[in-house]
Image (spheres, rainbow, N blue to C red):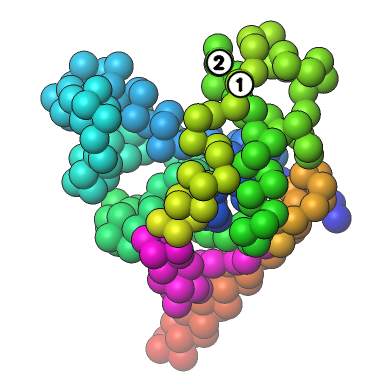
Amino acid sequence: MAEPAADATLRMVVLGRQGSGKGTQAARLSATYGPPHVSTGDAFRAAAASGSELGRTLKSYMDRGELVPDDVVVGVIREHLFGPGAPAGFILDGFPRTVAQAEALAEMASLRGIDIVIDLEADTEEVLQRMAGRRVCTKCGATYNIVDNPTKVPGSCDACGGSLAQRDDDTEDAIRRRLEIYETTTAPLIDWYRQRGLLVAVNAVGDVDAVTARVVAAVEGARQAKAAGQKSAASQSKGKGTLGT
């Protein structure tokens, strides 16, 4: 396949179970196409550090360890991605998590919409194996996996040299509970986006590079389909104009 053409205006959403590789593939899509990779955590940290009223409200929930309400989450995303100085495109990882959040994102992006939604498919046992092997840099937050995405030097972050640790919530019982929550709250998003013709399912099992190749192929297919649709619409519009003259 030819080298994909960069386009920093692309707007993408990456869905998938915890451990399906959303962060890794979103970062790689960002490197390939140009739009920034935006995780919910990134947006939350930026809002909390901004000192804005919304940021202070968010920080109060985070400091208390409470679930952040939908209206605050949506407000943070609106400010981060659609406020002054916001990027033209983005690759979202971790938002939306519910149909209500997806509806809010559709409203925010209404003028240009979302270009493609990638659903990374990996079964429960695959995810359990991956998450048990996940390690996070204690200094910069970079994520690795001792099984399929190890660091060059064991125990040391490739990006900053910080030490790696396993998250407290990466035990099997905790992972299974999070997967159950995903099935009841986030999985309905798949049908929601499929009904709107935006969803492309990608097999997320196997070598990381092979998965990336599948994801890029899916994005390229969506871009080509969109371009063909725009060309057809323009041709039909031109034909109607000719008939009316």
Front-lying residue, 106 or 214:
214
Work out how far the residue at label 1 is from the one at label 2, CA to CA, in angstroms: 7 Å
Look at the picture and state if 124 lies above or below 69: below
The residue at 64%/10% (across/down) is: 162
CA neighbours of label 1 inside 10 A, class few (<14), some (14 to 19), many (20+): some
* Nearer to the camera, 197 or 192: 192
Front residue of this view, candidates 85 and 44: 44
* Percent position of residue 179, x then y: 49, 55
Which label was assigned to residue 138? 2
Residue position marked by numbered label 1 in the rendering: 165
- Residue 3 in view (yes/no): no
Q: Is residue 191 left or right of residue 135?
A: left
- Lateral position of residue 104 relative to residue 95, left or right: left
Q: Where is residue 34 in the image (x, y as percent from the top left)?
A: 61, 36
Between 115 and 41, the one lying in front of the other is: 41
**Quadrant of the drawing holding the C terminus:** bottom left
SS label for mark 1:
strand
Q: Is residue 111 magenta?
A: no
* Count of residue discs: 2
Q: Which residues, given as a range, are shown in magenta? A: 183-202
- CB atoms of marks 1 and 2 within 8 Å: yes
List x then y, in percent, for residue 1: 85, 55
Residue 27's place in the image compared with 104, above or below, is above
Looking at the image, tell me whether mark 1 or mark 2 is earlier in sequence order.
Answer: 2
**Element type at mark 2:** loop
Q: Does the magenta stretch include residue 194?
A: yes
Which amino acid, mark 1? Ala
Residue farthest to the right, as pictured: 1
* Quadrant in the picture for residue 83: top left
Q: Which residue is drawn at 57% across and 73% down?
A: 229
